[in-house]
Image: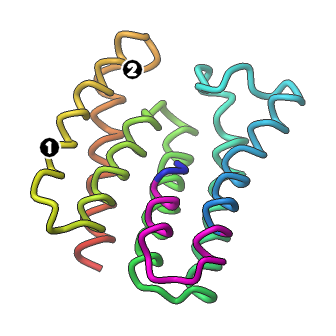
Amino acid sequence: MILVPTIAFAVSDVSIFYKLLFPLLYILVTIAPFVILHRMGKISDYEFTKREERPPYFTITTIGYLALFLLTSFLVKDTTLIHITLAIFVAQCILTIVTLYWKMSGHMTFSTLLFFTLIYLFPYATFLPLIFLFTPLIAASRVILKKHTVMQTIIGTLVSATISILILWIL
């Protein structure tokens, strides 16, 4: 969740202020709700093993990612960063909605988004598509650890791949 915007802002042409501010805001939006909900006893572990514990955290972070997308759009005005922050928001939004009815792998969703974002940011790095070799390894780890089923990892990957292609290359 945090690597995608951090890398995107770091390699962008925006001012050093935004390069520092936005990654910090993404860290805050991602970690603060977890800490608060964990202290309140609403979340038992950082992997959100229990599906019923996911909606409050995912809803809060979705709203935070929407705010960061809007801030990027109105303050930074960099098309690449707008597309990437939109992709983060949409991925989190879909993950939040799906979580209300089913469990989808957030690890697969955001690792796939990271891989597509790296290819989007560095289109001439011909070796970069090899990063997708990690996809089955991450999926297998989630299944072996009994955190997800094979289908939950596949859906997380497909949803994120679809979002990435639509927003980063077609939009």
Q: Is residue 39 left or right of residue 71?
A: right
Label 2 element class: helix
- Mark 2–mark 1 distance (CA, rounded to whole Å): 20 Å
Q: Is residue 71 left or right of residue 120?
A: right
Q: Is residue 137 left or right of residue 29?
A: left
4 relative to 156, above or below: below
Q: In front: mark 2 or mark 1?
A: 1
Most common secondary structure along the magenta stretch: helix
Q: Is residue 154 left or right of residue 110?
A: left
Task: Out of 85 and 153, give the one closest to the viewer.
Answer: 85
Q: Residue at x 73, y 20 (%)?
A: 44
Tell me the amino acid under the disc marked 2. Answer: Arg
Q: Residue at x 64, y 58 (%)?
A: 26
The location of residue 45, given as percent across then percent down, is 68, 21
- Asked if labels 1 and 2 touch by Cβ distance under 8 angstroms, the answer is no
The location of residue 20, given as percent across then percent down, is 64, 67
Tell me the amino acid under the disc marked 1. Answer: Leu
Name the quadrant of the C terminus: bottom left
In the picture of the structure, the residue carrying the numbered disc 2 is 142
In the picture of the structure, the residue carrying the numbered disc 1 is 130
Q: Label for residue 112?
A: none
Which range is magenta?
4-21
**Which of the 4 quarters of the picture holds residue 168?**
bottom left
108 relative to 64, above or below: above
